[in-house]
Amino acid sequence: MKILVTGGAGFIGSAVVRLAVSRGHEVVNVDALTYAACLENVASVSENPLYAFEHADICDRAAMDRILVAHKPDAVMHLAAESHVDRSIDGPGAFIQTNITGTYILLEAARAYWEGAGKPEGFRFHHISTDEVFGSLEAEGQFTEDTPYAPNSPYSASKAASDHLVRAWAETYGLPVVMTNCSNNYGPYHFPEKLVPVVILKALAGEAIPVYGTGENVRDWLYVEDHADALLCVLEKGVLNRSYNVGGENEATNLDLVKMICGVLDQRRPSNAPHADLISFVADRPGHDLRYAIDPTRIRTELNWRPSVTVEEGIAKTVDWYLDNQDWWSALQNRDGVGARLGTKS
Ligand SMILES: NC(=O)c1ccc[n+]([C@@H]2O[C@H](COP(=O)([O-])OP(=O)(O)OC[C@H]3O[C@@H](n4cnc5c(N)ncnc54)[C@H](O)[C@@H]3O)[C@@H](O)[C@H]2O)c1
């Protein structure tokens, strides 16, 4: 299959690119190379004849038309987005532009391409979204695909809007779509402004490890390589016009996750143990959702997919990856806003 991946120089998109190429798919990576992008993430496939890169913005309709016609993909996997909740609090405009307007422009370009090709039945527009569109849970319950949308941050509201656009393009124009809403990812190549890499890198530097509020927020932690596998599974086997929730089946509070990371570092760097002494509670994020939890029944029963690692295994692999790849993350620490406390405006 030839797959056009948007956002393939980012964290999850690059995992999809690497996995798809390793499975023999042709991949066209379309990325605007924002602050969150890193072409090193796809260096392992950049010379592969199955791989092509297009430096382009999904908001540029002419570029999207040209790329689709030039490469003639069988599917679009749409991951390009502004993705950091804290940045969406400080500057929501970029999130509205890329996540909503960009998705609209990409949908229109994909529709024109699909109609121009005679509406091939096998074409798929796979929209990758987040469980954050469902809002916040109390201590009990899980998100199903039928949970009403109740986004709380500018980021999750922009992703919710994009989900609605995709649904409407399927219903109104017959564009063949599949959608996924996943929980919090972690793993190799995670940009060093997100919780897991922040904790690892602060602990390695012997600096205070910031934990928002009291650290009691619960997330369902999904290893990024498992997520990429789930996305290809949904693309290949998912029912047309259906959405699938993807979770790691690994709920943990932020504080427990931070302590887990510290425990792995205590084993790898015993002279600096206990790293948990560096934990420092800081002012909470405004509108910080208490709990997200995924009911994985649909993807498990319909597509026979489940995650391959526990959060303990995934965190150990992730810590080891950061220990082995200092060149990758130290180069990114100079980028705008990385390392600073963002998202405190309310
Ligand atoms: N990271 C998570 O835990 C998580 C969880 C659920 C859903 N998601 C969703 O998965 C997708 C990928 O997330 P991620 O964490 O890999 O994000 P990321 O921020 O690491 O990467 C986003 C990529 O998109 C590119 N991009 C941004 N704006 C663009 C534009 N206008 N045109 C073209 N490219 C553009 C960036 O350059 C970057 O390479 C997003 O849609 C996000 O909403 C992420």
Image (tube, helix red, strand yellow):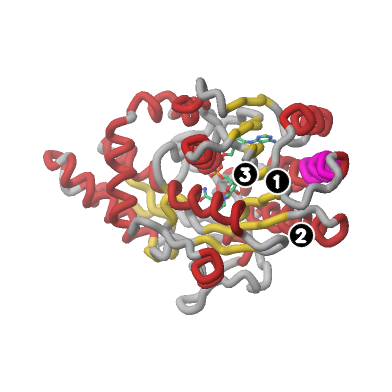
Ligand 1 within 8 angstroms of badge 2 C-beta: no
Camera-side residue of 96 and 345: 96
Find the magenta span and give its range: 104-114
**Label 3 within 8 A of ligand 1 by Cβ:** yes
Circle nearer the N terminus (3, 2): 3
On the rendered image, what quadrant is the C terminus found in? bottom right
Please tell me which of labels 3 and 1 falls first in the chain: 3
Q: CA distance from mark 3 to mark 2?
A: 16 Å
Residue at the spot of label 1: 99
Residue at the spot 37% in from the left edge and 56% down from the top edge = 308
Q: Please report the residue visible at 55 percent of the width from the left and 23 percent of the height from the top.
A: 49
Q: Position of residue 343 (x, y in %)?
A: 56, 47
Residue at 83 percent across and 29 percent down: it is: 62
For marks 3 and 1, give the one nearer the viewer.
Answer: 3
Residue 11 pos. (x, y %): 50, 40
Q: Tell me which corner region of the image, top left, top right, bottom left or bottom right, holds residue 169.
A: bottom right
Label 3 secondary element: loop
Q: Quadrant of ligand 1?
A: top right
- The mark closer to the camera, 2 or 1, is 2
**Which circle marks residue 10 in the picture?**
none
Q: Amino acid at mark 1?
A: Asn
Residue located beneath label 2 in the image: 167
Around disc 3, counting alpha carbons within 10 Å, would you say few (fewer than 14), some (14 to 19), or many (20 or more)? many
